[in-house]
Amino acid sequence: MAPPSSEEPAAASGAGAISKVLVVIAMQTEALPLVTRFQLVEAAADDSIFPKGAPWTRYHGDYKGLHIDLVWPGKDPVLGVDSVGTVSAALVTYASIQLLKPDLIINAGTAGGFKARGAGIGDVFLASDVAFHDRRIPIPVFDSYGIGARKTFETPNIVKELNLKVGKLSTGDSLDMSPHDETAILSNEATVKDMEGAAVAYVADLFSTPAIFVKAVTDIVDGEKPTAEEFLQNLISVTMALDQAVMQVVDFISGKCISDL
Ligand code: ADE
C-alpha cells in the first residue's frame, strides 16, 4: 500500500496517535453488532454528510480515545436489499475519505474461505494482500490493472498480539464461483473471497489512507455445501466472531500511532 503523503494528518504519517477510524461494512447484519458494541449513533437522514439520494448510512461515536465512523452502503433504493459489492463499497469509501478524512480504514465483513488453504467456518482473517478475480482484460498491462493486486497496510503487531490468521483476499461481484473465477482466485493465491475488499483497497490507496481488512468465514468455497445456503446459515453466528475481532483490533489501535500497528 502506498505510503501516506506529506499532506496527510499527523496520524497518517505515523507521527501522532490515531484519532479517526473509518469502518466500512457491506451488510446491515454485519454492522449492527458493532454499532451496539461501540455505542455509535446513526447520523440523522436530514443531517447527512452524504449527497442527497445516496442510501449510505453513517453511525458515529467516541470509543477509548478514538472517533469511530462506521459506514454502510445502505439498502438498494429499488430492491431494498443490502447494497453489497464493489461499486457501492468504492463509492461509500470514496465519499467517506473525502468527508471524514480518517487516519485508518477497517473494512470488516464476511467472506468465503478455502479449506485447502486452512480456512474454517468462523475463522477471522487479516488480509495481507487483495486482488480482483472477475476483471479479465487479456491485453498486456490492462491484465494487471484488472487484477489490481496490492499489498495491504502491514500490521505485524496486530497479527502478533491478536493471533489472527493471515491470508490473501480475492474480491469479485459474485457470491458464487464460476470456473473462470476459480482459476483467477487460485492465481491470486487467495485463502478468502469477498465482494468488497479490493475495491476498498483501491480507493484507500488512491488517497494514501492506510486500510486493513478483517474478514470472517461464513462458508467454505471448496466444500460440499451450496455457498448461498451455508452463508445464510452461518451469517448471524459468524458475525459475532467478526464483531469480537473488530473490537479487539480497535482496542489494540486505541492510543497507538499508525507505525505501532
Ligand atoms: N461473503 C461471504 N461468503 C462469500 C463468498 N463465498 N463469496 C464472496 N463473498 C462472500
Image (cartoon, rainbow, N blue to C red):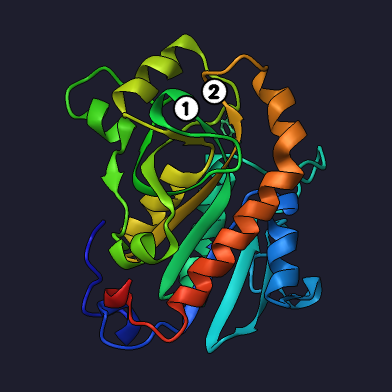
Image location of residue 228, percent across then percent down: 70, 25
Of helix, strand and loop, which one carries label 2? loop
In the image: residue 245, left or right of residue 9: right
Q: Give the residue type at disc 2.
A: Val
Q: Which residue is mark 2?
A: 221
Q: CA distance from mark 2 to mark 1?
A: 6 Å
Residue 112, image quadrant:
top right
Q: Residue at x 33, y 81 (%)?
A: 257
Q: Is residue 76 above or below residue 147?
A: below
Q: Is residue 38 above or below residue 80?
A: below
Q: Give the residue type at disc 1.
A: Phe
Image location of residue 54, percent across then percent down: 69, 57
Q: Which residue is mark 1?
A: 114
Task: Point out which mark residue 78 bears.
Answer: none
Q: Residues within 10 Å of mark 1 (few under 14, many from 20)?
A: many
Q: Residue at x 54, y 34 (%)?
A: 120
Disc 2 residue lies near ligand 1 with CB under 8 A: yes
In the image: residue 104, left or right of residue 218: left
Query: From the image, which quarter does the N terminus lie in?
Result: bottom left
Residue 139, image quadrant:
top left
Q: Residue at x 25, y 70 (%)?
A: 4
